[in-house]
Amino acid sequence: VGPEPLVYGDRKVYTVAAFNRGVASWVARLPTLWIEGEVTELRRQEGWQSVFFTLKDPGDGACLGVSMPRTGFDALRLDVGDGDRVHVFGRPELYEARGVFRLRALGIEPVGLGAILAGIERLKRKLAAEGLFAVERKRALPLFPRRIGLLTGTDAAAKRDFLTAVAARFPAAQVVVAETYVQGPSAPAAIEGALRALAGEPGVDVIVLARGGGSFDDLLPFSDERVVRALAASRVPVVSAVGHEQDTPLSDLVADARASTPTAAARLVVPDEEELRERLERLRERLANDVGRIVERAQRDLAADRDRLALAPALLVERKRAWLDAAAGRLRALSPRATLERGYAIVRTDDGVVRSAAGLGHGARVDVELAEGGFGARVEEVRG
Amino acid sequence: VALWERGEQLYRHCVAKLDAAQGRIEELGSKVREAQP
């Protein structure tokens, strides 16, 4: 039942509310459908029940307001922003209070570049969850690679840049080049195969995946799951030098090292010979100086030791002689001869030195020793 | 007295030994000096 008009004579007049309600009810009967356009003016706030944006036709700029329940929008986990192309599934509606016509969205899907980006984002999350981008997985590049594997496009400027930089920095380096498709639908499989072949080359201990930049589409193979997994599984460290700063390909995240250009990759994988020589020269000079100083110090120590060694026995003899002289002094101080010199005499019997008169009898024979000479005698009187 | 005399003998013996050692040291010292470049 439609809204009832007011009747003025032969004129039927509708109120705004009645008109809006009538149109809204008519619009509500339209089917749900898909509409393609670019997202602009996306407005989303925590306090709002709905998310609003404008869908713009990139051809002629025609615009259509879109609303979507915020919970539904958030559940899609879309990373859409202004300029992203999307397909919106929804039903047209008229917002009666304001008479605003808009699309009530039930679903949104990115298309074109947006869809690809969303796919890459999903793959990135999945591989990150598997730990493929973890810092702990990164391997150190060899300091002096025996052979470098270069995987690049056929007749690519990247190859020329890399080889030129390697030759300039470290002419002795050996590079094994594998040229393959690096763009287009066949590129992921080609890159995967070439990687495996390069890693199998004897002596190859680092691989550089090089491309001199390109459009977003050109670089898509470097974010392909097969390529990313092949890089992760490579038995030798890999440097990703795909050369695109703005949209980091997944190869950059999984590789053991990344370089912004093939020339920068060359700087990563080979040392600069001239710099090495200068460093070697500095080290050689330092070594010579250090050795000279060590030898000088050793010579000084040796001379001091030699002097000490030369003096030590003489000093020892002197010390012993001093000790001996002191002992001789003590010996002389105790000398019985010195006592005899002072007028004393030593009296002996056959039993030895006489220290007491008690052991002597009258007429006993004794020997008397003086400072000079001696004599024999007999005891005439014994006193108590 | 005999003990003291033995002490004196020992002293003379030690002095002789020290003199010999000193002579030997001086002899070796001069050899070393001669051998130095």
Image (cartoon, rainbow, N blue to C red):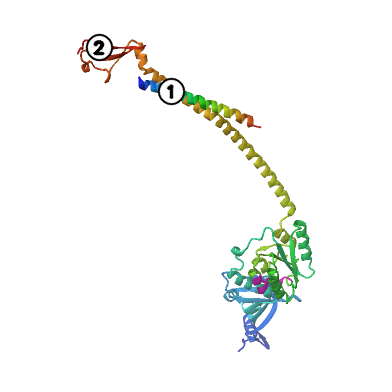
Q: Quadrant of residue A196?
A: bottom right
B4 or A209, which lies in front?
B4
The residue identified by callout 1 is B11
Give the residue type at disc 2: Arg
Q: Are marks 1 and 2 in contact (CB under 8 Å)?
A: no
> Subunit of mark 1?
B
Residue range highlighted in magenta: A218-230
Give the residue type at disc 1: Tyr
Q: Is residue A19 magenta?
A: no
| Residue name at image x 58 percent, y 70 percent | A129
Q: Mark 1: few, some, or many residues within 10 Å (few <14, many ≥20)?
A: some
Q: Is residue A371 above or below residue A84?
A: above
Q: CA distance from mark 1 to mark 2?
A: 38 Å
Q: Nearer the viewer, mark 1 or mark 2?
A: 2
**Circle 2 sits in a helix, a strand or a loop, which is it?**
strand
> Subunit of mark 2?
A
Total marks shown come to: 2
| Residue name at image x 50 percent, y 27 percent | A317
Q: Quadrant of the N terminus of chain A?
A: bottom right
The residue identified by callout 2 is A378
